[in-house]
Image (tube, coloured by chain):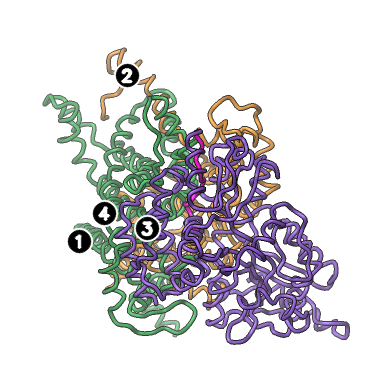
Chain colours: A orange, B green, C purple
Amino acid sequence: MFPTPIERTKPSTQLLYKIALPISIIIWLLPLLAVALTSIRSGADINSGNYWGMPTSINFMENYTAVFTDSPLGYYILNSFKITIPTVIGAIVLSSLTGFALGVYRFKLNLFVFFMFVAGNFIPFQILMVPVRDLSLSLGLYNSVWGLVVFHIAFQTGFCTFFMRNFIRALPYELIEAARVEGVSEFKIFWYIVVPLMRPAMAALSVLIFTFIWNDYFWAIVLTQGADAMPVTAGLNSLNGQWVYNQHLVSAGSIIAALPPVLMFFLMQKHFIAGLTLGAVK
Amino acid sequence: MYSYWKNNQLKIAPWIFLAPGIFMFSLYVIFPIFQSINLSFYQWDGLGAKTYIGAENYIELLDDEYFIVSLKNNVIWLVLYLLAVPAGLFAALFLNQTVRGIRIYKSIFFFPFVISQVVVGLVFSWFYDPSNGLLNIILEFFGFDTIAILAEEDYVTYGIIAAGLWPQTAYCMILYLTGLNSVDPEQIEAGRIDNARGWRMLWYVILPQLKPATFIAVVVTIIGALRSFDLIDIMTGGGPWGSSRVLAYYMYEKAFSEYGFRMGYGAAIAVVLLLIMMVYIATILYRLYQDEKGS
Amino acid sequence: MKKIFKNQIALALAGILAGTSAVAGTLVINGDTSDPAPKAAFQAVIDGFEAENPDVDVVYNLFDHEGYKAAIRNFLSADAPDIAFWYAGNRMAPFVEAGLFAPIDDVWADQGLYSLMASSAPGMTMDGKKWGIPYTYYNWGVYYRQDIFEDLGISVPTNWDEFIAAGETLKANGITPITIGTKYLWTAGGVFDYLNLRTNGYDFHMALTSGDIAWTDDRVRATMANYQQLIDGGFFLENHAALSWQEALAPMANGEAAMYVMGNFAVAPLKELGLDDSSLGLFQFPAITPGVPMAEEAPTDTIHLTAGAKNVADAKRFLAYAARPDVQTAWNKALGQLPTNAGAGVTDDKFLNQAFSMLNNDAPGGVAQFYDRDTKAEMASIGMEAFQEFMVKPERLEKILERLEKARQKLY
């Protein structure tokens, strides 16, 4: 293990390390802690410029409920779920199929198709902006939750295919061979043999895609307008423009908006990290 | 019919599995790339008819000082954003211990990566706020002059990049933490016997083994730097007087913002961005190709 | 998508139930009344309309004020509402030219608006047709801390020397003369407009914003020299490039700054921040070049029937309703602004009375809309960005003017 395990060092170093840990974490999260602090202040504190002194009152409940009652943030969050969940399902279904095809079969264009997905995943997606907007318009999907879902599924298929294909490559190929010898059809092999084995990959991808899509801002502002289909990222920014003198409420809103992916991360930490590294370090 | 399927199952099946994915990906990603390239030779306001104008958009770019500023900022982003890689390595080394509660610490360090860039942008705009921001409170406390980072053309891009480094460092840290897990303990012991420690150990024994993690950290960071958009839009809107624009943002502004609707010109900017990115994409694909040939 | 669908069902239902009056349904309106007062004011208009027309269900899509200006181009060509908020003058031209707004001369005729709205008619006319209903306009001017001026014995400045002297007195007392937040640029456009209107007059200003005069012209330089006098003199709030216009209200409210070159819409938030009629005042931007007739800025806000409207009949009913004197009286009372319908009453309010008299009696030079409404959109963005830069880096004047001139030659 590197660096030298702390328990093998001098007691003074050990002590230093134990002090350094909490201090570093506080410095690291300082900007966020500041926002958390602001989010429980009263409007009076904000107006009088009391950002850093003792709060005159703790308005935790008031502020966090005000965000839902006085703004459409709750609606935006609902939109975010409506966009994120179908995207996760769609991207996983599509990429299981493509990943299986590219991971199991040997055919001439295999590598070419694979590289197409990988390269597409890495392009600066701004180049897609104008055509995708026009496409959404002509499909009647502009400014709808489904417009975002369909685009996200398509785009995420690039990364997910890369991920799934590498995962399937690492599965024992003999299983599939054996099934073929038995005369099992390709579809049944996929459904009964490979899909059950892919569960860990699916779990990891779900958490990752959930986070990516929940946090998407660019496509939200390109493909939606107004409150109709706007997810929480774009909604939060628009709220920030309206609530100039209510920074405590925007802060509370920011924390609420950050919560779902954070919870997702803590609950599914193992899968999340597996996902990041599996997709990354082949 | 049935026997044809039976005999050719292995040839046809992959295409059946691929069809939906390829269809969607082509429709929304591959074709639009070419449509954008095509559009960059047109003048179009998004409302009326398109006019073919050849390379005029590109010629205009050469003489557009806002474009030059954006390009320059992209280079700054590219270089400074890469600091996330050593910073992430440092954080990973710092946290790669087995003391009590270390898992919680690791998770909390990773925290910023999970948060939306919109929230990160808001958090840092408040952090930099000239009158009430924590940064200036701290500066004042230590007797320095306050500074409105987001209103100074010389600092604004660095201020935004610093905000961007926050989640990106967390990302690199996780990659390295996993990498460190798979470092071969025998080699470390061998290194120790050879009396390598500290920096020498890190440089000669550990880093070579972390190569895959480094590669991927560099790749995701470069791509993140070239795609940077959210933070700029949230924190400055490209200002002051356009000095924090990058290509991705400038193209959005030219094509979709309040005062521009020059789709063709925006597309030309995007094509330039794509060309820059192609260098990296080609590297990645080349490496993948080498790996595939090897296996 | 959902909206359209709902709309179609409503229309279909109405068709089935036909035999009653007009075809009713959902009326979709997109607007940018995101600040509290305008939001409540327009909600009251909707409520009033729905009460009179129970068969119509108004769906109002509220946009963030800054975001709306970009969004409208998208939704007009993509998923048009029935009615959209916008602005009069040149700012309306691209949408009229692209066929995205629909003419409503019939509403003007039915409501007798040709005479009742004669003063705002030119701003709504293109190709001889009327393209919308102006529902409000508001003055610009110098809003100031009346109490601070009185305490320091400063009288309201009427010419440039007095203005500079007033600023010096304020500075000597540790007060920033002018607050401003230029993060979203347009506030700087207002300052430039007034300086140019006062230095060179209305006709020159309109010629400049129409692209007929070089930015390197000596008369522009004269305007910029006056601008520079304020900048070099430290008249403007520090860090203004980091602040939105609302954030710049706070220094004025707490007495750190004393003046704000602003539109009337700043009065409501300033009062919310604790100012009242005794502490807040308004004066006309002082004369600069003697003999140049005083001209004012008074942007007109409008609502339009879109070309893609699905419920034209109800949309026209709504537009007619919005033009009515009684509706405009109440609406503008809630907005704290001036009605465009001559039959409507002006709310008895210190600032509105003063503004009304200023625009009708003290603006012989003419009334401009605003920099970003009088000039082409792309030029406006380059121009306002240049003003912001100039306010922080005045030493770059030459480069800035050259850049503007280059843009003008390309865009006009």
Q: What is the C-alpha distance between the residues marked 1 and 4?
A: 34 Å
Q: What is the C-alpha distance between the residues marked 2 and 3?
A: 45 Å
Q: Are marks 3 and 1 in contact (CB under 8 Å)?
A: no
Three-letter amino acid code at the position of disc 4: Val
Badge 1 and badge 4 both on one subunit = yes
Magenta region, residue range: C174-186
- Identify the residue position indicated by label 1 in the image: B293
* Chain at numbered mark 3: A
Image coordinates of residue C318 in percent, x first then y, are 75, 73
- Identify the residue position indicated by label 4 in the image: B75
Residue at the location (39% across, 27% down)?
A: A24
- Identify the residue position indicated by label 3 in the image: A175
**SS label for mark 3:** helix
Looking at the image, can residue B115 be seen?
Answer: no
Residue C178 sits inside the magenta stretch: yes
Q: What is the C-alpha distance between the residues marked 3 and 4?
A: 49 Å
Mark 3 or 4, closer to the camera: 4
Q: Are marks 1 and 2 in contact (CB under 8 Å)?
A: no
Circle on res. A7: 2
